[in-house]
Image (cartoon, rainbow, N blue to C red):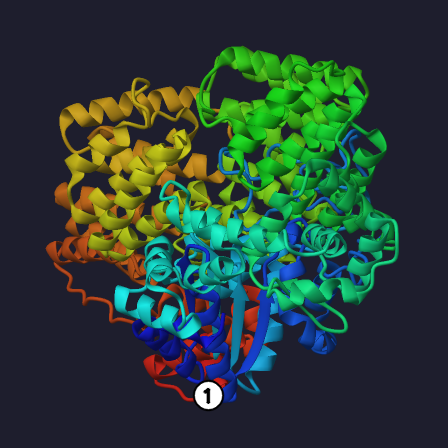
């Protein structure tokens, strides 16, 4: 299997050569895909040779089926020659990478500080007792939190106090930084063979890298066997699918490797190989060794892969028993260390086995070996050896390996599990420890696999139930809904205690996609929470009630039921400032308990003492209670902390909430970068719910800016995505946004029809708790008599419901609506009353109120009096950059006899949201490396953005950038 396998691959070679040759200039990735033996590895070898010949550093790794359960094994293969550079990385990155490789313990939190990555248990509030019954810790994987759950923090358990699993994104960023340091000296090519057998965490890191190669001299060349589903296929990596050789190339290759083949066998080999290079090489060897092997070429019904394996099996039969035993141990092994294989082979044979036993296999071309390692020449050889062995021999081989793997508890546990054909609680407990260690290294997928295997070995019902629930929890984190459902179905018929039943219900909530209905489910959640509290687990009870409150937010059931949820939560022995309790009050009774929520938010702001996830929880609670003036600071704190900790799966929903908060104040500098980052993260982490939310916010900003084409396009994308994930809140926000777009376009009737859907109980977009937000757009859009009557009726209902709400946004929007919908005889008083409200956090609403007041005065022929509010409106809209309303205000002011010029574009209008975000960070004095650490991009990518920013702003240095952003 030499370079002859590149016969007939000129086109494919040219593509690979182009990727390699471009590395000094730009990064690129390519996925080579095809069936076994088609020549993928040969093409990879060709690329490696070309890269090395061109002065490019090459890092290689190869997936092995037996290693898929070893976390970050593939990443360690790739980077093992760079480990001496790890101490040069930022401390957090270095610790994460060393912990991932098992070279250091996971970092620990300071004493008394929560270590709960999701912030939904005691860890969300310092000093709160932690729950019992869970061995795992919540952690977002490459797909982020479970997307079937509306709440990103829903359905996750708590870790042991103190230990913090390294976050996946911190590990991935550390890898990018490590490779970037290396690439600064010479371009780097990552060459990965048999990627379908890499461990899941390594695949996730490669996906992270593939999205960030463009600005780096980094190449990623991956080989993937046809028929295997891999997350790499969903990363947007270009694919090159290798096809069978053309007949002429196949004949040329066969004549090269078997020039003396008789015409009859030659014809059969050409037919049987179907253009597969490996078959063209190996089938003649099988025929030469055993003429009866002609059956391998004669059976058209036998798949080509099976024929190749049969060819290897026929070669295996000629080897001595000692050699076959050593090959079986090698096939079962997941390390490839020669000394280890020989020791296990000796245990398997019951007598000492030396390297001489391997020589026949080397001569037969089945393995290669040196003084330290042994490897099969092709993965099909491994599968052929395993397939030819009896079940008892395979079990014995794994048992022999387990006996010699001293000091390697994870590998030993996996081999013990593979060596046993019955339930064994001791082995199940060993796999529990494997799961804990994998979890501690940030390898959730491996922890899940270990727990699933442990459930099949469990002898005790209680142990099996706990493992099934823990495994289902991890499956939810990874977004594996079907896998989680299967695990919960296995747990359901078991004898479960009160806590276990409560956990099962909570996990089932994580699987729910229809979160807006079911009064019986609400009753069940409350009753189960009450039983959990009686059983001594108030934290678990509070999480159930938080889930029930979330359902209340969506479905708005009768007040008595919502009050029951709140009453049950307030009876729990938890601090009244517990973030989950505040969240529960805000979600279940945002109006009735709005004053309580705001009072507790004020106390928390004064006292501090909450951590990053708690800030995210409290920020979300603030938005539910319309306390956007409180939400901004909490969400900015949460976003900065989550970004610093590498918890990007939780960062996307936080950024979406922050973007919606920024829309209220038309804070472009916060909102636009938040939207851009949220979209990038939600796309990368496959978080459709938060991608929809980010697009809604983007459409709102586009409408305010007057970019109506973009606004309509983006809200259309959001609506299509929103319908697929069935989120009532998003549906309501979509209609509010369509109303805003209609107002920006001057299409008031269309705007009214859209916004009215939020007020119509028969409409899927109906959302009673968002009506206090929508009422401002409804009032502005109501121009006809019938529409104004409908809007007044809706406003009257809101007045009755929201009379006790102290939320600034609620008071401002209701005051605004009353002014715009008032009859002429009451309008002046209504305008004065509204203008007396504190609108410091609602500048856009205040400007619209000024415009409406000036317009009303002008139309009543009070032209002189109209000029002052219209002038204020023009200045306000221009300061905010809200062009459609600004133009309307200028027209009204001209009608009142005073001219006004259109606002001139600013430099910032030329920057994209991501450029604006990077420019602000650079102006604050951060280096490219520091900015890259915050945004999870490479320093070279940051430099490329600044390279575009400087000419746009007409500057040439960072000092000028600082002066432009922070003028004296």
Q: Is residue 123 visible?
A: no
In this rendering, the answer to whether 25 lies above or below 194 is below
Of residues 119 and 348, the one drawn nearer to the viewer in this rendering: 348
Horizontal side of 223 relative to 312 (left or right) equals: left
Q: Residue at x 41, y 71 (%)?
A: 260
Few, some or many residues within 10 Å of mark 1 (<14, 14–19, 20+): few
Residue 907 image offset from top left, x and y in percent: 33, 75
Q: Quadrant of residue 253?
A: bottom left
Residue 537 image offset from top left, x and y in percent: 78, 24
In this rendering, the answer to whether 776 lies above or below 512 is below
Residue 901 image offset from top left, x and y in percent: 18, 67
Of residues 868 and 627, the one drawn nearer to the viewer in this rendering: 627
Residue identified by numbered label 1: 957
In this rendering, the answer to whether 496 lies above or below 649 is above
Q: Residue at x 43, y 65 (%)?
A: 39
Of residues 717 and 88, the one drawn nearer to the viewer in this rendering: 88
SS category of the residue bearing label 1: loop
């Amino acid at each position: 299997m030499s370079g002859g396998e590149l016969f007939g691959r000129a086109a494919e070679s040219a593509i690979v050569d182009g990727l390699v040759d471009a590395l000094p200039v730009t990064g690129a990735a390519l996925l080579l895909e095809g069936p076994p033996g088609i020549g993928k590895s040969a093409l990879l070898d060709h690329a490696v040779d070309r890269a090395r010949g061109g002065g490019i550093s090459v890092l290689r790794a190869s997936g092995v089926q037996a290693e898929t359960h070893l976390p970050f094994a593939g990443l360690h293969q790739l980077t093992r020659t760079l480990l001496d550079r790890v101490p040069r990385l930022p401390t957090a990155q270095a610790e994460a990478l060393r912990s991932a490789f098992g070279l250091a313990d996971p970092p620990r939190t300071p004493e008394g500080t929560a270590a709960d990555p999701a912030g939904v248990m005691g860890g969300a509030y310092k000093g709160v007792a932690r729950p019992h019954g869970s061995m795992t810790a919540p952690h977002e994987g490459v797909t982020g939190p479970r997307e079937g759950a509306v709440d990103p923090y829903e359905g996750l358990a708590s870790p042991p106090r103190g230990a913090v699993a390294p976050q996946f994104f911190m590990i991935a960023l550390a890898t990018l930084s490590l490779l970037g340091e290396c690439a600064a000296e010479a371009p780097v090519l990552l060459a990965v063979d048999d990627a379908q057998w890499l461990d899941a965490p390594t695949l996730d890191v490669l996906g992270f890298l593939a999205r960030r190669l463009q600005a780096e001299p980094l190449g990623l060349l991956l080989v993937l066997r046809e028929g295997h589903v891999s997350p790499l296929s969903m990363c947007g990596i270009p694919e090159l699918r290798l096809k069978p050789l053309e007949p002429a190339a196949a004949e040329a290759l066969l004549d090269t490797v078997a020039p003396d083949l008789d015409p009859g066998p030659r014809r059969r080999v050409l037919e049987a190989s179907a253009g597969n290079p490996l078959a063209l090489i190996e089938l003649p060897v099988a025929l030469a060794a055993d003429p009866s092997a002609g059956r391998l070429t004669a059976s058209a019904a036998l798949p080509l892969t099976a024929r190749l394996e049969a060819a290897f099996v026929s070669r295996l039969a000629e080897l001595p028993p000692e050699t076959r035993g050593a090959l079986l141990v090698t096939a079962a092994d997941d390390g490839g260390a020669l000394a280890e294989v020989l020791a296990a082979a000796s245990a398997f044979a019951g007598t000492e086995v030396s390297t001489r036993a391997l020589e026949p296999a080397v001569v037969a071309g089945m393995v290669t070996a040196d003084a330290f390692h042994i490897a099969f020449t092709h993965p099909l050889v491994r599968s052929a050896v395993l397939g030819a062995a009896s079940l008892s021999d395979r079990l014995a081989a794994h048992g022999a390996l387990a006996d010699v793997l001293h000091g390697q508890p994870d590998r030993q546990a996996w081999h013990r599990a593979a060596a046993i054909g019955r339930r064994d609680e001791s082995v199940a407990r060993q796999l529990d420890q494997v799961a804990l260690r994998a979890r501690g290294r940030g390898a959730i997928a491996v922890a899940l696999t270990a727990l699933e295997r442990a459930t099949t070995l469990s002898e005790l019902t209680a142990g099996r139930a706990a493992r099934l629930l823990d495994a289902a929890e991890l499956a939810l984190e990874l977004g594996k809904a079907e896998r989680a459902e299967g695990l919960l179905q296995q747990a359901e018929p078991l004898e479960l205690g009160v806590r276990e039943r409560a956990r099962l219900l909570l996990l089932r909530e994580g699987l729910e996609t229809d979160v807006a209905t079911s009064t019986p489910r609400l009753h069940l959640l409350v009753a189960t929470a009450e039983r959990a509290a009686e059983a001594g687990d108030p934290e678990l009870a509070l999480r159930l009630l938080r889930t029930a409150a979330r359902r209340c937010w969506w479905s708005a059931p009768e007040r008595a039921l919502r009050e029951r949820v709140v009453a049950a939560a307030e009876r729990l022995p938890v601090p009244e400032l517990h973030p989950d309790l505040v969240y529960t009050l805000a979600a279940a009774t945002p109006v009735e308990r709005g004053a309580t929520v705001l009072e507790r938010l004020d106390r928390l702001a004064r006292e501090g003492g909450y951590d990053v996830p708690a800030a995210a929880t409290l920020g979300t609670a603030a938005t539910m209670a319309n306390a956007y003036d409180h939400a901004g600071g909490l969400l900015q704190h949460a976003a900065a902390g989550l970004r610093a900790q590498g918890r990007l799966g939780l960062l996307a929903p936080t950024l979406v909430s922050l973007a919606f908060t920024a829309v209220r104040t038309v804070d472009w500098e916060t909102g636009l970068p938040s939207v851009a980052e949220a979209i990038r993260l939600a796309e990368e982490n496959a978080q459709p719910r938060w991608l929809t939310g980010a697009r809604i916010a983007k459409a709102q900003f586009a409408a305010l800016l007057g970019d109506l084409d973009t606004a309509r396009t983006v809200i259309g994308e959001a609506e299509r995505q929103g319908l697929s994930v069935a989120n009532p809140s998003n549906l309501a926000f979509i209609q509010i946004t369509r109303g805003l777009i209609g107002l920006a376009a001057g299409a008031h009737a269309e705007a009214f029809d859209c916004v009215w859907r939020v007020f119509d109980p028969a409409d899927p977009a109906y959302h009673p708790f968002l009506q206090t937000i929508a009422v401002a757009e409804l009032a502005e859009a109501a121009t006809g008599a019938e529409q104004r009557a409908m809007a007044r009726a809706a406003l009257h209902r809101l007045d009755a419901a929201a009379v006790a709400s102290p939320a600034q946004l609620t008071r401002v929007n209701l005051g605004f609506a009353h002014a715009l919908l008032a009859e002429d005889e009451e309008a002046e008083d209504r305008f004065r009353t509204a203008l007396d409200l504190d609108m410091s956090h609602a500048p856009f609403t205040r400007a619209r109120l000024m415009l409406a007041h000036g317009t009303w005065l002008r139309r009543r022929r009070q032209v002189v009096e109209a000029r002052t509010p219209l002038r204020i409106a023009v200045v306000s809209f221009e300061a905010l950059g809200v062009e459609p309303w600004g133009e309307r205000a200028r027209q009204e002011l001209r009608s009142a006899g005073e001219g006004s010029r259109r606002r001139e574009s600013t430099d910032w209008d030329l920057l994209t949201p991501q450029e604006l975000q990077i420019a602000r960070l650079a102006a604050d004095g951060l280096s490219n490396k520091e900015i890259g650490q915050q945004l999870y991009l490479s320093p070279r990518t940051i430099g490329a953005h600044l390279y575009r920013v400087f000419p746009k702003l007409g500057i040439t240095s960072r000092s000028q950038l600082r002066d432009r952003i922070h003028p004296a």
